[in-house]
Each structure stands twice: as C-alpha cells, then as structure tokens.
Amino acid sequence: MAKPRPTEITAAMTLAAAETVVSQLVALKLIAAEGVDARARDIVNCALVTDDGYEIAKKLDARCSWKCNLQIAEELDAFRYLVRDELHAAEALWASENCIEPPYPVGSHVKLRTGEKGEISDISSHYAAKYLVAIDGDPQAQQPTNRRYVVNFEDVVIQEPERDS
C-alpha cells in the first residue's frame, strides 16, 4: 500500500525555498554573500507561507535588522511560490516512488470529496497524480472558459449511474 500523499509543508521545504531566495538576492547583489545560511533561517523564522514579499520584508526589518528595499521585497515575494513548488516536487516524488496510477479513466463520472459531481476530462500534466474535472452544471466548464478543477486522484470516487425508480 502506498504511503499517503504529502500534504504538509515541512521545515525542509521552507528552508529550501528560503535558500533559493537568498541565493537570488546574493546573485543580484542585494545582500552580501556572507552569512547566507543565517539569512535563510531569518526568512524561515519570520515569514509565513502566505506572506507576500512586502510583508516578509517588514518582518525581516523589524525582527532581524535587515535593511530591505523595494527590490529585496520583490525578490522575497517568490518565497511563497517556491514553497508551493517544493510541495509539488514532494508530491511528484511520492507519485513516482509509489507508482501512483490514475484509478479511473478519462471520461469517468466522479464525485469529489466536496460532494460535487463531474467528469474527468484529463490528467494534469502540471501536477502529480491529479485529475482535471469538469463540474456538472458549471457554465464556465464550457467554451470559451473551459474551467477545470484540479483534484487529487484519491479525492474522487466513481459516480454510479442513477437508477430510475
């Protein structure tokens, strides 16, 4: 049986994202190359993954004596996206290591964990082990919008055809 999908952001993920941001700040000569490990830890200790770059910059100024300017704030804005990318990478690794395959074929009618019903229109090419689902009755699921919900394989069940009574 496969281990469960990673859903939690770990300390390692936030540190990796912070290290990437710090490397970019150094490359742009916005901060000194010395003390990069401490700078990455500052970001981890101050930033929430929902903070934008300006919020992170304010916290770093106040708590860690950084001297942030607008350019630094703009680069710090990448932190939340990099953390998200780390989680997606962990999901991709999980799917690969556990040989995760779609349980239902494209075209299946399914019920989502939220109770909504729809049709699997494709398998996501951007995210590991996720379907693209067109929700029944959603006017934006039609042309020209073609809205699709991105849903974990394990969060859908096959929808049995309704029986006439």
Image (cartoon, rainbow, N blue to C red):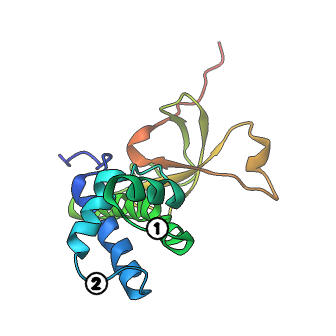
What residue is shown with label 2?
33
> For residue 40, which numbered disc appears in the image?
none
Tell me if 104 is positioned left or right of 99 in this view: right
Measured as percent of width and height from the top left, residue 159 is found at 53, 33
What residue is shown with label 1?
68
Measured as percent of width and height from the top left, residue 146 is found at 73, 56
Under mark 2, the amino acid is: Ala
Looking at the image, tell me whether mark 1 or mark 2 is earlier in sequence order. Answer: 2
Residue sitting nearer the eye, 141 or 70: 70
Numbered disc 1: secondary structure? loop
Q: Quadrant of residue 129?
A: bottom left
Residue sitting nearer the eye, 61 or 7: 61
* 7 relative to 27, above or below: above
- Residue at the image point whose x is 63% and y is 51% from the top: 148
User: Image quadrant for the C terminus?
Assistant: top right
Measured as percent of width and height from the top left, residue 124 is found at 50, 61
Under mark 1, the amino acid is: Cys
Q: How many residues crowd around disc 1 within 10 Å: few (fewer than 14), some, or many (20 or more)?
A: some
Give the Cα separation between the discs numbered 1 and 2: 16 Å
